[in-house]
Amino acid sequence: MKAYFIGLVIMGGCLLYGCHTKQEKGENSSDYSADSQSIARQDTLPLPIDTHAASSVSTEGWTAKQIRDSIELFFGKEYDTLPPHLRKIRGNLTSLWNTDDSVFLQLIIAEKEYVEAFKTYVFNSPLIRIGGGPYDRPPEEAISMDTTHFSMRVRPNVYPTNIERIEIAITNHTDLEGMGGEEYFIERFDGRAWKGIPQPTAFVALGYPIFPNQTRDDFSATLMPELKENPPGLYRVRKTVITGQGAGIVHYPLAATFYLSDNPEDYEEYTRFASRLHEPRPMAEFKGGREAMIRFFEQNLRYPESYKGTGTKVRLFYSFTIDSLGMLQNPVSLPENILYPRDTGKTYDEFRDEALRVLRLMPAWEPAVNRIHGPVSIDTGLFFYFNEEGKCGIE
């Protein structure tokens, strides 16, 4: 059965198409109680006249691809132009794909009210299969932590209940370089157990170095108050840091608690630093932007001669630093950074060497600029692909 896939990643309530994501799937097994009014109170709003609830039109004879394309078009409108109830429905959608005879939707919250809202205001067809929910991890799962190696904290420690993002710092107490990713899991303590709360279910598979005996304070986690209210109380965020390579990798599970409150006196520290906390993170940029960078690598990358005629296709990752002058520093691609093919016993050095050759040809970037400190160094990375047809580039 042929499948067509459109990747959707929800980060901060936005819908991004065409991203490569890692996503967990499962039935909604949590006993987290639904707010039956959270969708319903938005449903009383009339639909705008330039939009239609697809369930109000006949879909008899439609193919799965036509339905998928219609849903994609429906959500392709500018987010700010959508009425509140459609923003909430769109923000709850985490992935969309189709086979020849079915359309599959994954939702962040797959409770009845949210499923019915989608069917009422967007599309209702017997070809649609709806699933999802981030609660397939046992909320009472014990965490074994060794804070002598790594420690994590949320700062400030108290936020308002309508907060969309918390800031996280991880300290490396070892002489080894650690690596932390974007993935996290957030839970609320209900007086008896820790219960999962709505959050993105897909994350970009990138790692960020945490250098020996240093603190990295630019991790964050997204809460989604626009989907379901987060009440005052005690919360915790969980992440994992790794050290080592290959068979020597060691995983360090971390957890840090924080509070949400409706009392401004409780989150006074957050109020003082709010403007700094939520300003955009500084990012370095290839001169000319993303399109210019894609063209540069497509024009300069070459498929290794020794592999021609073998049909070998390779996908790999390089991490590197762009310093405060915009120059490339510390490019690294380890054998385990070969993302495809996996477990062949080969290191594909020729492909990694070719990617490094072209990385070193790059012109200086526009450096990242911090509002207070000016130009700063920033860690980033690129995914490379090579195939025998001569099409090589970055993703």
Image: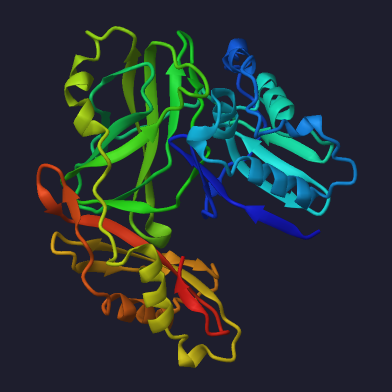
In the displayed structure image, the side of residue 63 where residue 153 appears, left or right = left
Point out residue 347 in the picture as x, y percentages from the top left corner: 44, 76
Q: Is residue 246 visible?
A: yes
> From the image, which quarter does the N terminus lie in?
bottom right
Colour mode of the rendering: rainbow
- Tell me how many marks there are: 0
Q: Residue at x 72, y 35 (%)?
A: 130
Residue extending furthest front? 49
In the displayed structure image, the side of residue 134 where residue 214 appears, left or right = left
Point out residue 317 in the picture as x, y percentages from the top left corner: 41, 65
Q: Nearer the viewer, residue 121 or 113?
A: 121
Rendering quarter of residue 77: top right
Point out residue 195 in the picture as x, y percentages from the top left corner: 50, 20
Q: Residue at x 26, y 77 (%)?
A: 360
Q: Nearer the viewer, residue 277 or 330?
A: 277
Q: Is residue 252 visible?
A: no
Residue extending furthest left? 373
Rendering quarter of residue 344: bottom right
Q: Nearer the viewer, residue 365 or 218?
A: 365
In the displayed structure image, the side of residue 392 where residue 37 appears, left or right = right
Q: Residue at x 63, y 28 (%)?
A: 48
Up the image or down, 320 lies above or below 252; here it is: below
Up the image or down, 164 lies above or below 126; here it is: above
In the displayed structure image, the side of residue 88 where residue 281 appears, left or right = left
Rendering quarter of residue 159: top left
Q: Residue at x 60, y 15 (%)?
A: 34
Point out residue 313 in the picture as x, y percentages from the top left corner: 55, 77
Up the image or down, 226 lies above or below 284; here it is: above
